[in-house]
Amino acid sequence: MLIFWIIVFLFSLAAIVKGADWLLTSSEKIGLALGLTPFIVGVTIVGAGTSLPELASSLIAVFEGALDVPVANAVGSNLFNILIIAGASAVVAKKLAVTKDIVDLDIPLIFISTVFLILMSYDKQVNFAEAILLLVGYGIYLAYTVLYHDDQNSDELKNQKSKRPQIRALDIVILILGFAALILGAKFLVRSVIELSTLLNIATGVITVTAVAAGTSLPELAVSVKAGLQKKADIALGNIFGSNVFNAFVVVGIPGLFADLNVDEKTYAIGLPVLIITTLLFAISGISKRLHIWEGLFYILLYIVFTVKLFGVI
């Protein structure tokens, strides 16, 4: 039975990641065809799209009664994004130069969203009112991001009409298939996590904060490492910011509308403190406008220590 549920976990993970990719690709094209600017599409559809696997699995988990999954999912994904994705990108690039926009806008927002998530989780629960506050926080983030970039994108809207792609029937089919794969993949992923938790006598939160979070973030890792090799810091680090803010506010906020969420003991005692330390270190690296190879190696080492500590090896 153990081998069976490991196989189900891996296939479900593949389905949820591929489904999110199809959904993201078709949604992006449809958004542009409807007249949205590339910037707005990037902030809303693309920014949220990279975290669709986390959102889908967290929602399904709530309906399956696994109420400790959403917070563990958000915490684990955000840790993986910073420590492994940013860390590996810095290692392959040897040094990533951080732009002024990242220092002025993205780093403060990622830090604020992390603090917000920790405050909401402080009593080991996220209730309906706190979920609403998280979603309001994401709305403010979206509004601020759009207003901040408004002047830089004023000419983009004028030229957009002549560049609109055409919506084809295939785009709609891919959208539907992507949504179906995402939902079915998430359903079986959550089921396999619950079964593996029982068989291995490991809390669902621990499996979620490690294996699920890492698995759903592998596509972003591939993109960021490739960008790091090409010395494209904005691309290498860009998806981390939008994804972390979305995870903190929405991946916890939306499931919290349907049930009071729990924070499992390991996520509370280890995950949340490591997340605030990690985000603070990342902010300091950003302020220096450089992410060096030694920082990248330190981030990866910190993630290994976190994982080992989570499983009680040390």
Image: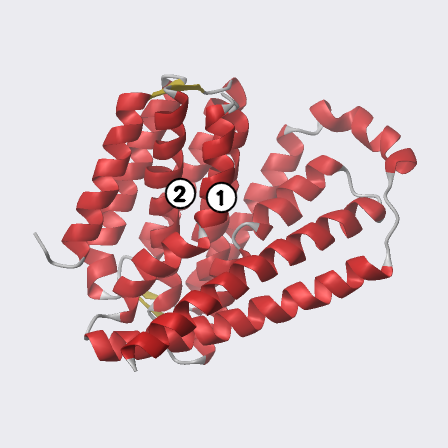
Q: Mark 2: few, some, or many residues within 10 Å (few <14, many ≥20)?
A: many
Reply above or below: 188 against 79: below
Mark 1 and mark 2 in contact? Answer it, CB < 8 Å: yes
Identified at 47% across, 79% down, the residue is 63
Residue 124: tell me if it is visible. no
- The amino acid on which the numbered mark 2 sits, given as a three-letter code, is Asn
Identified at 82% across, 32% down, the residue is 157
Of the numbered discs 1 and 2, the one sitting upstream in the chain is 2
Residue 9: tell me if it is visible. yes
- The secondary element bearing badge 1 is classed as helix
- The secondary element bearing badge 2 is classed as helix
Q: Disc 2 designates what residue? A: 81
Identify the residue at the far left of this view.
314
Q: Which mark is residue 146?
A: none
Reply above or below: 90 against 115: above
Q: Where is residue 32 in the image (x, y as percent from the top left)?
A: 79, 44
Reply above or below: 112 against 21: above
Q: Disc 1 designates what residue? A: 220
Q: Where is residue 204 in the image (x, y as percent from the top left)?
A: 29, 70
Q: Quadrant of the N terminus?
A: bottom left
Q: Where is residue 280 in the image (x, y as percent from the top left)?
A: 30, 33
